[in-house]
Amino acid sequence: MNVDAAVKAVCKNGTYIGFKEDGVIKYLGIPFANVKRWQAPCPVETTREDVFEAFSFGPSPYQDPASILQKEMSEDCLNLNLYTADLSTTKKAVMIWVTGGAQIMACNAGTIFMDGREMPYDPSTLVRENPDIIVISINYRVGFWGTLALEWLPDFKEEYKYSPNLARLDLMASLKWVRANIEGFGGDPENVTLYGQSAGSNNITSLMFMEEAIPYFKNAICQSSFAMDISMTLKEDGEKIAREFFKALGAETLEEALGKSNEEIYRAQMELNALSGPAPYPGTESKFLSTAVDGVSIKEDYWDYLMSGAMKGKTVIFGTNSGEYDQMFEPFAAENDLKSARQLVIDHNWGKLDPVKGTNPEYVDEFLSHHKDERDEMTAYMDLKMDLFVRDAAVSFAKCLSGSANTYMYDFDQRKNDTVMGRCNHGTEMEGLFDRQGVLSERVKRMIRDIWTSVARTGDPNCESLGVTWKQFKENNETLMLNEHPYMADGVRMDDVELTIPSFREYKAFPRFAALWKKD
């Protein structure tokens, strides 16, 4: 085969033929691991003699096809896309994008919003601006294909012991493939940065609890979801959810479940997910399909492990947006329906805030008493929902790692408009990363790309377009307020965080963590 050497990458696991488009060489659908249902991923067994024409996206994980750009789906979905400016430059920094999707959706080609808008995960603008950086986007198993407790079944077998955390193991398998093959594309295997949003970020923070994963990445940028509290599933909750799934699936044994079609698994999953919605699954204190404290991939002492210096010397960034879940409150805001807004927050956090069950009934009213000169009651409810789901966890990760890792924190508070619903929602920063039209100005979009690539290149987010020195997160809770005119702040609404953090599972279970919050 006569192939232009400029798009031919010879690597350990294959010879990959790409194509050039708009100044970027693209390799689509490269397999990085093989799967068997509910088992850990297996490395690909191909060699450099195997030629792979990487001209089109590989299959997506099983999920709702209406939510993803690549409609072909398969259990054998572990493939990646790679974008680079050339193959001649060596020692390029490597960025790996981990997409979100509430652990039930993920597609490395891109997603489709509920209103029909498409979000392709094409980093071509970023690569053209930064030809010394390679960008990779990966697939990982989602839904009950990627997270399912099986140990309780009568015919459980040892090869299924990793089933509660397959999504995380898939991510680790991609890191191992990158370590083995990236030099063939001009990349530096020792300089890998993970970045992801929502469930993607959650899975990245999960890797921080997994000792085997730590050596495979140097930096991590974690956006708007973090493996903590309701975003971690304890064994008993995982088993409870799995039993309900098996009922919906019409199976009583592992063998019966293995014989079910993917369509049957999907129908059973949707039956349960309809009950769960955006809140923790009924009767549990875990969000649906969260990372599992399974005692195998993630041990019961996971938070102590994190605090022991697991991420020493690495650069980590934790960030949230000012209006993460404001869109959930939009119907209430239009009618100024404060009663319904309050109830939504309680329903989504029943383990912490439900007065009927006697759990911290004072939290809501005390939270409302904070910052009364700066926010109205509706905004306070939106802040409380956001804090309990993501922001408290972001601050907690930053506090726990600031003594050993190069730790930074941001609050993305660019406003869309001046109304109560005018704050940036969950995922807004992706407009900058993938150069998509939306609410952000070109200046802010470029700034986001500059910051993220600076981290990948040097481990330091400071760059010329930022215009301010981004200080590391330390005793004063130093936080970058990211917007059209960035500035540093000593924390963001820390009184709100300090009020609610004692209700978190890690605060109760790990004295060393609780001690960080106790005042002398």
Image: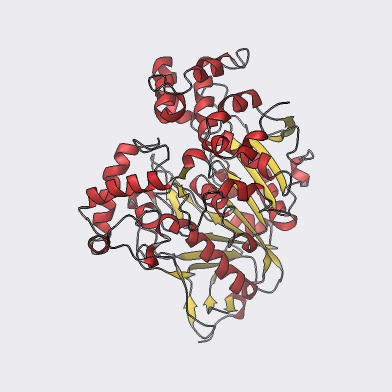
Relative to 504, say whether 495 is above or below: above
Q: Is residue 2 above or below residue 372?
A: below
Q: Position of residue 16 (x, y in %)?
A: 53, 76
Can you name the residue that lies furthest to the left here? Answer: 250
Nearest the viewer among 154 and 246 is: 154
Rendering quarter of residue 320 = top right
Work out whether residue 76 can be spotted.
no
232 vs 127: above or below: above
Question: Where does the image place residue 96, in percent across and percent down from the top left?
Answer: 58, 58
Q: Between residues 29 and 155, which one lies in front from this camera angle? A: 155
**Residue 115 relative to residue 50: left or right:** left
**What scheme was used to colour the molecule?**
secondary structure
Q: Is residue 485 visible?
A: yes
| Residue 198 coordinates in the image, percent (x, y) | 51, 44
* Image quadrant in which you'd find residue 512: top right
**Residue 109, position in %: x, y?**
46, 57
- Residue at left 34%, top 64%? 37
Looking at the image, residue 318 sits to the left or right of residue 138; the answer is right
Looking at the image, residue 322 sits to the left or right of residue 402; the answer is left
Does 356 sit left or right of 19 as displayed?
left
For the C terminus, give its image quadrant.
top right
Viewer-closest of 92 and 260: 260
In this rendering, the count of numbered labels is 0
Image quarter of residue 500: top right
Residue placed at 22% from the left, 55% from the top?
A: 252
